[in-house]
Image: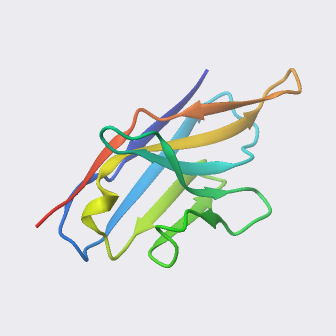
Amino acid sequence: QVQLVESGGGLAQPGGSLRLSCAASGNIFSINAMGWYRQAPGKQRELVAVNARSSLGNYADSVKGRFTISRDNAKKTVYLQMNSLKPEDTAVYYCMMTVPRASGMSRDYWGQGTQVNVSS
């Protein structure tokens, strides 16, 4: 069983910063992609940033230059540093990890979500 636990959400003022963390636990030998998605009220879930094992990270255009994704493989943790926050960044943020299984297939696991509110 694999579980992802997120932390670091909360309230920030426009122009402020927050750092999200997501730690995985359970039967994990390795992790392929790690990423962050978000879902605002009334909108579909969208990709924010993703980090594959061999890349620095890919970002949604709306967050490029403001958000940075990073990972610590030894800690099975992915981070999202969010700077220059805007009200439109308000959403529930979900982490996702792609984990190879014994069957040879990979499976995506999701965190429970953490709320980020950007408001003055």
Task: Name the spot of residue 92 as percent of width and height, x first.
Answer: 35, 43
Image position of 83 (left or right of 60)? left
Q: In which quadrant will I find the C terminus? A: bottom left
Q: Which of 34 and 43 lies nearest the eye of the viewer? A: 43
Q: Residue at point 59% right, 50% down?
A: 35
Task: Name the spot of residue 105 as percent of width and height, x first.
Answer: 84, 27
Q: Which of 38 and 1 lies nearest the eye of the viewer? A: 38
Q: Which of 51 and 41 lies nearest the eye of the viewer? A: 41
Task: Name the spot of residue 45 as percent of width and height, x first.
Answer: 47, 41
Q: Which of 60 and 32 lies nearest the eye of the viewer? A: 60
Q: Residue at point 39% right, 38% down?
A: 113
Task: Name the spot of residue 109 as percent of width and height, x first.
Answer: 60, 32
Q: In which quadrant will I find the N terminus? A: top right
Judge whether 20 appears above or below 66 on screen: above
Q: Residue at point 66% right, 54% down?
A: 73
Judge whether 120 appears above or below 32 on screen: below
Q: Residue at point 47% right, 35% down?
A: 111
Image position of 99 (left or right of 62)? right
